[in-house]
Image (cartoon, helix red, strand yellow):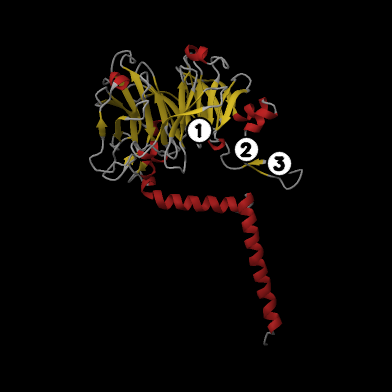
Amino acid sequence: MRTSVSDRIGPAFFALSFGVLAVIYGIFSAGRGWFPAPQVDLAYRTLLDLSTNWENDLALVPTRHLVAPGGGNTGPDRGLSGAPAGASSEGYILIAGLSEKQDESFHVVRLFDGTGREVRRWPIRYELLDTEKKPQNVMLHGMEVFEDGSLAVTFDAGNAITRVDACGEPMWTRNGAFHHSIARDGEGRILTWQDETVVWLDERSGKAVRTLAIEDMIAAGGRAQQATFNIRTRTPENAEEEVRYLADPFHPNDAEPLRAEMADAFPMFEAGDVLISLRELNLVAVTDPDTGRMKWWRHGPWFKQHDPDFQPDGTITIYDNGTGEGASRILRVRPGEGAVETVFAGSEAVPFYSWRRGKHQVLADGNILLTEAEGGRVLEVTPEGEMVWERHMVWDAKQNLIITEARHVPADFFEIGVPNCAPS
């Protein structure tokens, strides 16, 4: 039996209408995060990640940990340029990241003396800490050093925080999503982030002694404080539907306690108050750990910042990544005042740019030690912006190893000189 034109037009019109409605729904669902936009986006990003990093996941080449060299020096002979001077020549530099000797350990912390010579290293064996994830799929990101030569470390995308001895053997381990930074409070505790909660751990045992969650900070403040948490949410469609956070609305990446010896420089605060950084909100704040009340906060002018630090002169310095700008900066702000000073900025003369990650340390002589994570490079600059030295952590002729932290300690920091790993 022959079908009429109208019989054929009906299904075609239905299919066309369905397609148009699907396109319209797709546009709205993508903009509002409705099903299936989040699932499609996750599937796409997962497929892209697997296609890019399959060699890493098979433990062939650590592609997740390699970057193009920063600073404009892409030559095969890059390494240490210049020579440590001033404060950096009178102590040690620790550098955390990936090991170029993969048969030794996947992650490593290296120690360089005042001449720039490597004098020892700590192997960080993630496989001893967590059986769920492979070492190549987590990133050493968070390091604290102790006078006895031990280290505390955390891992992005990992499931552990640990303190290892001078030989790299675990002294204690806590499992959980600890990440980004570790800071000692001078009272026998270390602070770090676990998911979206600041956690205080006993240095000796790793036992949690107190916590402060971001949700507690939100609840603790009045409307003025709550307004600082410009949370990315999806607006409900009816009164019964709950407001839901979108993915990673805060991205906490630092928690630093105000130590007692520096508290007099900050009359607005008290010893033990916590300086936090929430990257996605471009927010730096100082919080009362007992109440969660924020005593001071500021959004920008930094963008996707990391590593705010209390300084002895009563200021706070901030690593302004400047994501998308092509140059990162170190900024200085005095709580309670409006002015923000640029201490150092990447330039054509001294390139400096890490679109994510990164740490800084103001040294005793005023120089700044910079971790250019996404360039695989550490450099020291003077207050005038001149480069003192730089070190590329070389993987091969074209790629560097990501560096997550560089730290200077004085020559007399370690109790028995250079930490030694004697055979057991």
Residue 33 image position (x, y, % from top left): 62, 49
Residue 83 visible here: yes
Q: Residues within 10 Å of mark 3 (few under 14, many from 20)?
A: few
Judge left or right: residue 424 versus residue 330: left
Which numbered disc, 2 or 3, marks the residue that appears first in the sequence?
2
Amino acid beneath label 1:
Ala
Which is more toward the observer, 322 or 174? 322
Q: Disc 2 or disc 1, which is closer to the eye?
A: 2
Which numbered disc, 3 or 1, marks the residue that appears first in the sequence?
1
* Label 3: element kind: loop
Residue 416 image position (x, y, % from top left): 30, 13
C-alpha distance separating marks 2 and 3: 14 Å
Please tell me whether residue 414 is drawn above or below residue 101 in the rendered image. Answer: above
Which is more toward the observer, 284 or 253? 284
* Label 2: element kind: loop
Q: Which residue is mark 2?
A: 231
User: Measuring 58% from the left and 38% from the top, which residue is drawn there?
Assistant: 249
Q: Are marks 2 and 1 in contact (CB under 8 Å)?
A: no
Which numbered disc, 2 or 1, marks the residue that appears first in the sequence?
1
Amino acid beneath label 3:
Glu
Judge left or right: residue 113 versus residue 129: left
Q: Which residue is mark 3?
A: 242
Residue 137: name its quadrant. top left
Which of the numbered marks, if any, corresponds to residue 177? 1
Q: Disc 2 or disc 3, which is closer to the eye?
A: 2
Residue 125 image position (x, y, % from top left): 36, 31
Which is more toward the observer, 44 or 352? 352
Residue 237 image position (x, y, % from top left): 73, 48
* Label 1: element kind: loop
Residue 406 visible here: no
C-alpha distance separating marks 3 and 1: 26 Å
Q: Are marks 2 and 3 in contact (CB under 8 Å)?
A: no
